[in-house]
Amino acid sequence: MNVSKVNKMTVVRKVREMHLGDEYMQHELELLGDLSNETVDSAARKARKIGLEQGLEKGRRETAYEKAKRLIQRGYPDEEIQEITKLSPDEILKIKKGC
């Protein structure tokens, strides 16, 4: 049995026990129980992909900020910093205020 199916079944069973008598919740749990394992696995893969993309973008931004700090410290003009780092003038100004 696939791990996501075991996890889904466990969650559904536990929540069902917690909400005995709650017709709305029981209905929602039936809908959740109808999800195929492919749907759960696909959603998990999509979430991992989105998380990876967000992490990479955050890393790029942090690298650009660090590079801009060094360029500011070396006296580079704002226009060159913008061209090298692809940061906006406002972002460069914020970095300058923080240096």
Image: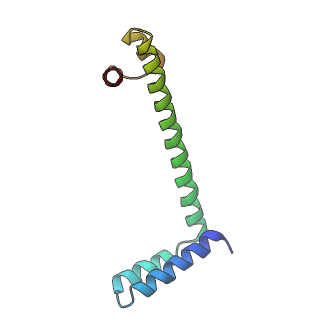
Q: Nearer the viewer, residue 46 or 51?
A: 51
Identify whether 53 is placed above or below 22.
Answer: above
- Tally the marks: 0
- Asked which quadrant contains residue 44, the reply is bottom right
Give 53 or 24, whichever is nearer the viewer. Answer: 53
Query: Which residue lies at the image location 34% right of the left edge and 82% below the top edge?
Result: 24
Quick check: 7 above or below 73?
below
- Using the rendered view, name the quadrant where residue 9 is placed: bottom right
Q: Residue furthest right?
A: 1
In the picture shown, does residue 39 fall above or below 93?
below
Q: Position of residue 22 (x, y in %)?
A: 34, 86
Task: Indicate whether 4 appears above or below 77.
Answer: below
Q: Name the colour scheme.
A: rainbow
Q: Residue 98, how many percent across, how many down?
A: 33, 25
Residue 45 vs residue 62, the one in the foreground:
62
Residue 89, position in %: x, y? 33, 19
In this view, which residue lies farthest toward the bottom? Answer: 21
In the rendered image, the quadrant that contains the N terminus is bottom right
Residue drawn where x is 56% and y is 49% of the image: 49
Q: Which residue shows up at 51% across the image and 77% down it?
A: 11
> In this rendering, would 92 be left or right of 57?
left
Rendered-image quadrant of the C terminus:
top left
Task: Please state the horizontal and vertical placement of residue 88, each as a whole percent of the image.
Answer: 36, 22
- Is residue 6 shown left or right of residue 77? right
